[in-house]
Image: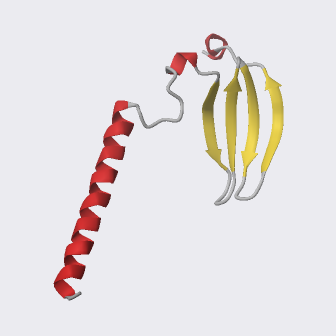
Amino acid sequence: MDLYDYLKFFAAFAFVLGLMGGLALILKRVGLGSASMLPADKRRLKVLEILPLDARRKAVLLRRDGTEHLVILGATSETVVETNIQPVDQKQNV
């Protein structure tokens, strides 16, 4: 194999990777790239808020079946801080 064959191979490889990336972006924009195919209002689990605490940890507020859970996610661990939090009525905060 000579240099021309190697260049041809890498150009074809880059082209295929570009096609795969473009297809992934199109599918994500259309909405087919998510793990769940359920509509947003039918999903049981939602991420309500994410708060970065430092470079390695973040606080995540999750809602499952109308109950909220506060979780600290780290690089190597997960900690449930509080569970069974009742959702705050948005009309009361106004």
Residue occupying the point 70% across, 58% down:
75
Image quadrant occupied by the C terminus: top right
> Number of labelled discs?
0
As displayed, is residue 79 above or below residue 6?
A: above
Residue occupying the point 82% across, 39% down:
81
Q: Is residue 85 left or right of residue 27?
A: right
Q: Find the residue positioned furthest to the front.
A: 1
Q: Is residue 39 left or right of residue 76?
A: left
Residue occupying the point 49% across, 26% down:
37
| Residue 41 lies in quadrant | top right
Give the x, y percent position of residue 34: 48, 35
As displayed, is residue 79 above or below residue 93?
A: below
As displayed, is residue 44 above or below residue 73?
A: above
Give the camera-side residue of 31 and 1: 1
As displayed, is residue 20 above or below residue 48?
A: below
Give the x, y percent position of residue 60: 68, 39
Q: Find the residue positioned furthest to the bottom.
A: 2
Give the camera-side residue of 71 and 32: 32
| Residue 55 lies in quadrant | bottom right
Give the x, y percent position of residue 64: 70, 24
Give the camera-side residue of 51 and 73: 73
Residue occupying the point 38% across, 38% down:
28
Give the x, y percent position of residue 12: 23, 66
Q: Is residue 46 left or right of residue 6?
A: right
